[in-house]
């Protein structure tokens, strides 16, 4: 997915002051979207970059110094029938609440989270900052479709000593998600690094978890792979997840396996949605431990899941120098079904029978 640091002008910001959250919508410098596009590239970038400054927020704090922060990622998607809708924001609200509690922060109320997400997208759309539906996207299963990416995150109050954050900010920034073209391969490699440990923060969407993930992903990409996959730290045997995505194995037996949740696995909303959709379809779905040996030997199809790209095929896994190729290196039928079903619901071409899509008010 092509992320761009080109935030939309309206940003939500709330601060925990005393006993309650005080929220505000900040309008950052902007012109109309078409006037911005008409600017010389340098000026356009400078204007976009100017939206990324918050001079009244402290530079020295527990987030910048010690990585004490958590975040969310969700999307507002242009609907075939018009307008925008957000995919399962209540689930992100609940996870953000749990993440903040897990970091001993005052948790952000879930209803406020959903309301602020909808309102931020709405206010930006009212200024013209939102993609609109394009029927062309249907031709390539929404691989090149646009959407609004929402990034809610916490930012700690000023401080230099090691401490928890008692009065954090919650900020919601939105950016446009551009067309995604899969240029590289779909090969993954097992990393020796550790993403999460028992009794650690792996279940929290914590900024600090991403240090090892970023290093491992960089190493994987330098070695020519698309993604790295982590094994559990205790046995160095069981598959956990990718750098920022959950993982699924569709076995030759017809069983769909994804590692069971625990304190080292991030409870992905895409993961939960795929489990539910596959069960509805009658597939045998297991949330259980799967060893790397079983995965390499028994897998027909493999894919990773996350908000950024939905379901992405993994066509091979390299472990201890040996490469196991799945389905002759092509995207399989089951993976295609998962990907198209998720995207179809999200963009409104498949009926949303579960009430997962929440409309952004006009
Ligand atoms: C966010 C995240 C995921 C995917 O979660 P979604 O809710 O599906 O976007 C998976 N693994 C990690 C480590 C993550 O941070």
Image (cartoon, rainbow, N blue to C red):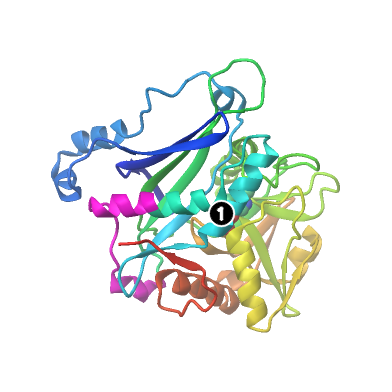
Residue at horizontal 82%, vertical 53%?
237
- Magenta-highlighted stretch: main secondary structure? helix
Could you say which is closer to the camera, residue 191 or residue 24? 24
Can you tell which quarter of the image residue 214 is in?
A: top right
Distance from mark 1 CB to nearest ligand 1 atom below 8 Å = yes
Look at the image and tell me whether residue 196 can be seen.
yes
Can you tell which quarter of the image residue 279 is in?
A: bottom right
Is residue 4 on the magenta stretch?
no
Identify whether 286 is placed above or below 111.
below
Identify whether 147 is placed above or below 49.
below
Q: Position of residue 33 (x, y in %)?
A: 20, 49
- Farthest right residue in view: 235
Is residue 124 on the magenta stretch?
yes
Residue at horizontal 67%, vertical 41%?
101
In the picture provided, is 71 more to the left or to the right than 132? right
In the picture provided, is 182 more to the left or to the right than 103? left
Instruction: Look at the image and give the residue range highlighted in magenta.
Output: 119-141
Q: Position of residue 183 (x, y in %)?
A: 42, 57
Look at the image and tell me whether residue 243 can be seen.
no
């Amino acid at each position: 997915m092509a992320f761009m640091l080109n935030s939309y002008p309206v940003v939500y910001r709330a601060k925990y002051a005393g006993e309650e959250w005080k929220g505000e919508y900040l309008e950052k410098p902007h012109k109309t979207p078409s006037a911005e596009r008409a600017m010389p590239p340098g000026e356009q970038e400078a204007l976009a970059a100017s939206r990324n400054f918050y001079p009244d927020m402290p530079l020295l704090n527990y987030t910048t110094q010690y990585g004490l922060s958590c975040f969310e990622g969700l999307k507002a998607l242009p609907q075939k029938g018009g307008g925008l809708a957000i995919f399962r924001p209540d689930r992100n609200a609940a996870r953000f609440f749990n993440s903040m509690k897990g970091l001993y922060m005052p948790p952000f109320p879930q209803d406020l989270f959903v309301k602020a997400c909808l309102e931020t997208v709405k206010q930006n759309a009212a200024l013209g900052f939102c993609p609109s539906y394009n029927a062309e996207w249907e031709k390539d299963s929404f691989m090149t479709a646009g959407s609004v990416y929402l990034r809610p995150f916490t930012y700690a109050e000023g401080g230099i000593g090691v401490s928890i954050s008692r009065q954090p900010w919650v900020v919601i920034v939105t950016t446009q998600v551009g067309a995604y073209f899969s240029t590289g391969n779909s090969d993954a490699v097992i990393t020796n690094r550790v993403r999460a440990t028992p009794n650690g923060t792996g279940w929290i969407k914590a900024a600090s978890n991403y240090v090892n993930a970023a290093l491992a992903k960089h190493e994987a990409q330098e070695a020519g792979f698309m993604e790295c996959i982590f094994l559990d730290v205790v046995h160095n045997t069981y598959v956990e997840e990718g750098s920022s995505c959950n993982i699924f194995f569709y076995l030759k037996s017809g069983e769909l396996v994804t590692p069971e949740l625990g304190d080292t696995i991030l409870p992905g909303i895409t993961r939960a949605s795929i489990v539910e959709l596959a069960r509805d379809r009658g597939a045998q779905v297991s949330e259980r431990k799967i060893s790397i040996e079983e995965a390499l030997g028994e897998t027909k199809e493999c894919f990773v899941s996350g908000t950024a790209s939905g379901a992405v095929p993994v066509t091979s896994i390299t472990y201890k120098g040996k490469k196991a190729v799945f389905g002759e290196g092509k995207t399989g039928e089951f993976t295609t079904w998962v990907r198209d079903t998720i995207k179809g619901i999200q963009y409104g071409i498949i009926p949303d029978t579960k009430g997962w899509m929440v409309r952004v008010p006009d």
